[in-house]
Amino acid sequence: MKKKIIALFILMIIPSMFLSCDNRTKKENTPQIVNNKIHIGFAFDSFVIERWERDRDVFVSTAKELGAQVNVQNANGDVQEQIEQIEYFIDKGVDVIVIVSVDSKACKEVVQKAKDKGIYVIAYDRLIENGNADFYISFDNKEVGRLMAKTLVDHVPPEGNIVTIFGPQTDYNVTLMEEGFNEVIKDYPLNIVYSVYAKDWLAEEAFTAIHNALDIEKNIHGVMCGNDNLASQAVLALSENRLASKVALTGQDGDLAAFQRIVEGTQTMTVYKPVDQLAKCAAALAVNLVKGVDVTPDAYINDGTYDVPCIILEPIPITRDNIDKIIIEGGVQKKEEVYLNVKYR
């Protein structure tokens, strides 16, 4: 499932060319949509995590460039609310529904209802289990787990004690991330002294987890956090115990605050996922599906029942060694923002 397709999307949103994610489309017999916009419903889990607002904005602007109109709904982490919002999209007769699922198992029936109405369904970033979505588009989440594990292996001494703070088990990405993490960690003599799944990705769960872990074992050498929001509270708890910067700590998403912690020395790495690329690709994919353009998937992933075609992007580990080159020189964040609290080296 792993394909190296980072940086594929240059010039993708030129409307006149109507490029696909990486020129994998075939345009023979493409039906023409005349005088009607393509209507896309985008159902988000929530906007609690910093990156989701960026996903929304880039997706909407790209879709607009490609002649589509997007209706965004936010479930605020409520499963039933998300199902009702998807049903609203079905009743409105949208052409495509893009879903960041609150619960990967809960959307199966409403997805089938949408497909029965001839509406395309794209699982965005999170796989919908047993849903038979038309496409799944995300980053390589097993690789995210591997990168986190490799960071701890490189920074924690043999027989060192680590804490793992995963996201909720209702998020299938967490399952994939944990599989990747365990693939690496099983071959090294590290002791997991405390492990937890943070409900609803609540950052406070990480704060509590660190204190609980320290009650069990005072010598903590590494902490794996499922995202940068969890890492923010893990760092706070470590700071209260004078352990910040002494403990290797990982996250993911590439939040600005995580970049700041990396240059400050309190976070070892974050897995950066270029969401602009993901959002642009998903918008192009949605429009291509409606226009009848064949899209060649990178691979297929089994959702529990069906083999779903997928487009997989590669995540990038960001550390103190490469943050200047990739994040600052790459134009992701400004130098003065990343180095807000410390002197630029």
Image: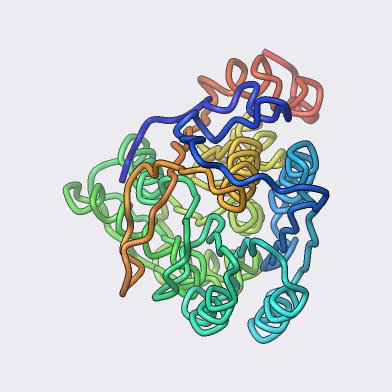
Residue sitting at x 74%, y 41%: 58
In the image, what residue occupies the spot 47% across and 79% down? 105
Q: Which of 34 and 47 is in front in this view?
A: 34
Picture mark count: 0
Among all residues in the image, which is located at the extreme left?
A: 187
Q: Looking at the picture, how far across and down is residue 124, in whole percent?
A: 56, 57
- The relative height of residue 54 versus residue 76 in the rendered view (above or below) is above
- Residue 87 position within the rendered picture, expressed as x and y whole percent measured from the top left: 69, 81
Specify how the rendered protein is coloured.
rainbow
Q: In which quarter of the image is residue 276?
A: top right
Viewer-proximal residue, 40 or 247? Answer: 40
Query: Would residue 160 appear left or right of 330 to someone viewing this image?
Result: left
Q: Residue at x 58, y 21 (%)?
A: 326
Q: Above or below — where is 200 with respect to 148?
A: below
Which residue is at a point 37% across and 60% down the rendered structure image?
308
Q: In this view, does 95 lie to the left or right of 334?
A: left
261 up-or-down from 140: above or below: above
For residue 32, side relative to residue 6 (left or right) = right
- Say which quadrant the C terminus sits in: top right
Query: Of 318 and 90, which appears nearest the observer?
Result: 90
Q: Position of residue 106 (x, y in %)?
A: 52, 82
Q: Where is residue 142 in the image (x, y as percent from the top left)?
A: 35, 50
Compared across the picture, whether 182 is left or right of 23 comes to: left
Locate residue 88: give its quadrant.
bottom right
